[in-house]
Image: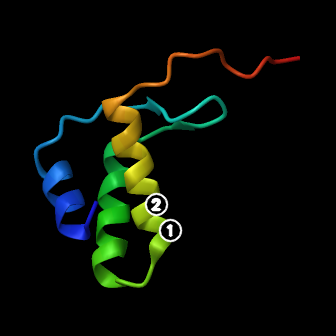
């Protein structure tokens, strides 16, 4: 996804408070996180970390993780 596509995707997206990204990662405060990453991405076009985080969030929204959690001991 390009930067413009990411911005358009999140403009009208209804985001939950938390989102399970994968087996080991749960993103809390999703709305604030997306906003912060979009601002950082627009401020520094060379910053690939924000773009990667946003793409992981898009992937988790479109195909939610439904596998087991990491066992707690």
Question: Pointer 2: residues within 10 angstroms few (<14), some, or many (20+)?
Answer: few
Q: Is residue 40 left or right of residue 6?
A: right
Tell me the quarter of the image containing the C terminus. Answer: top right
The image position of residue 24, as x and y in percent, is 66, 33
Decide: marks 2, 1 in contact (CB < 8 A)? Answer: yes
Which residue corresponds to mark 1?
49
* Residue at 18%, 60% in the rendered image: 5
* Residue at 37%, 63% in the rendered image: 37
* Residue at 36%, 74% in the rendered image: 40
The image position of residue 32, as x and y in percent, is 35, 51
The circle drawn on residue 52 is 2
Compared with residue 33, is residue 3 higher up or lower down, i.e. above or below? below
Question: Pointer 1: residues within 10 angstroms few (<14), some, or many (20+)?
Answer: few
**Residue 22 falls in image quadrant:** top right
Q: Nearer the viewer, residue 31 or 63?
A: 63
Compared with residue 62, is residue 36 higher up or lower down, i.e. above or below? below
* Residue at 29%, 58% in the rendered image: 35
């Amino acid at each position: 996804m390009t930067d413009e596509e990411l911005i358009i995707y999140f403009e009208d997206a209804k985001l939950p408070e938390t989102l399970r990204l994968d087996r080991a990662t749960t993103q809390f405060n999703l709305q604030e996180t997306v906003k912060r990453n979009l601002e950082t991405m627009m401020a520094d076009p060379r910053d690939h970390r924000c773009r990667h985080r946003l793409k992981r969030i898009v992937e988790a929204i479109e195909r939610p993780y439904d596998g087991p959690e990491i066992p707690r001991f």
